Amino acid sequence: MACSRCQILPLSVETRGTLFLTAPVRELIEVLIGFLEIEGLDFEDAGLELRLHEANLFEFLQRVRDAQAFNALERRGLSALLLEPGETLSFHSFTRARTLEHWLRLMDACELIEILEAKRFVSWFQPILSATDGAVIGYESLLRGQKPDGSLMFPGEIFSLASDNDLLFQVDRQARESALHCAAALGLQGQIFINFVPTAIYDPKHCLKSTVGWARKLGFDPRRLVFEVVETERVGDLDHLKGILDFYRDAGYLVALDDVGSGYASLNLLATLKPDIIKIDMEIVRGIDTDPQRQSVFRALVSIARELDIRVLAEGIETPSELAYVLAQGVDLVQGYLFARPAQDPPTPQRPDPWPLSQPT
């Protein structure tokens, strides 16, 4: 059974049910009653608990925010929980209760919540090229959220809102599934690189069940899928990450580490995790043809990767000079704006003609 953490949204724009409001002292309940009476909302009074039937938590919070009804201490003392129709009050359901302060912060992520609830994530794709001849060997999937007005929400905003509002589990799951569905719909060939956030996975056996299931249903050969760790340098629990990567490998998938070289943990990560592919951070690649310090770091990473039989992808390439340098160092794969920007239907990449030599120096 899949974990409900990534399946259930903490705040629904549409769901109605019985709204429970509680506080540790009756004085706070009286303040709350005063607000409900002013708003004309019917409720049941059960001492330290108030119940509103046929209520929507999102609408209730909008009223609270618009009226500016409670001070900071009151918002931290009052808690709310919505039970859906047919759901009974239980110890487990109480794990979803949050203070009004928490719920109101979550309101700031309402656009993201609407995208999640309507499942309006889409994936754009950027080509990844072989260093040998510039042939397209696959694509990286990059997440986009479609707002109701048709505009897009980009990864920086998506993951910032998700991290601040405890939505990483839902975002990460839908992002992985979006990548699979969109790649299949476009009929993309070659490998598909799919990003994932390790901290959004409790137990890979359960949390990744839906992802693996969709990969099978959509007919993907496991060796075509590369699951890519994002924010590699921020990984705090190596054992947990290793367990996730081992799960992917055991299922036949490839694994990659993103942003390698952007911090101090990279070498330890390479030795411990031994991924199939590393993506050298674009901050190292940027201007590398004229920067001796970046060149030293780059050469060291490539050398270690060779010893560990790890393929190297240089990302963020924007100029022919950057391309020529990384090819001369013997990378296996390249990616960047020089060839193509991410697109919903990726174009044929622009490649230098002739393709630069790629023998290591």
Image (cartoon, helix red, strand yellow):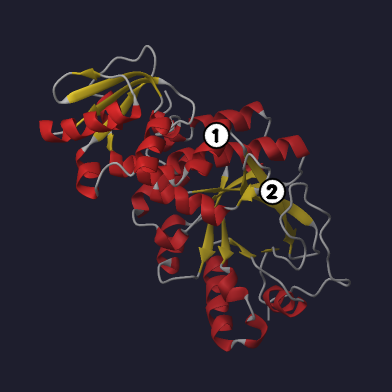
Disc 2 marks a residue whose amino acid type is Trp
Which disc is residue 211 wearing? 1
Q: Residue furthest top?
A: 86
> Residue 116 — which label?
none
Mark 1 burial class by Cα count in 10 Å: few <14, some 14-19, many 20+: some
Q: Residues within 10 Å of mark 2 (few under 14, many from 20)?
A: many
Residue 38 relative to residue 321: left or right: left
Compared with residue 92, is residue 63 higher up or lower down, i.e. above or below? below
Q: For the point 70% across and 50% down, which residue is it?
A: 125
Whether 84 is drawn above or below 228: the answer is above
**Badge 1 element:** helix
**Residue 1 image position (x, y, % from top left):** 42, 23
Q: What amino acid is found at the position of numbered circle 1 in the picture?
A: Thr
In the image, residue 133 sits, relative to residue 162, either above or below, namely below
Q: Answer with mark 1 or mark 2, whichever residue precedes in sequence.
A: 2
Q: CA distance from mark 1 to mark 2?
A: 18 Å
Residue underneath mark 2 = 124
Mark in the foreground, 1 or 2: 2
Percent of width and height locating residue 74 = 21, 43
Position in image of residue 265 (x %, y %): 40, 67
Q: Residue at x 62, y 74 (%)?
A: 285
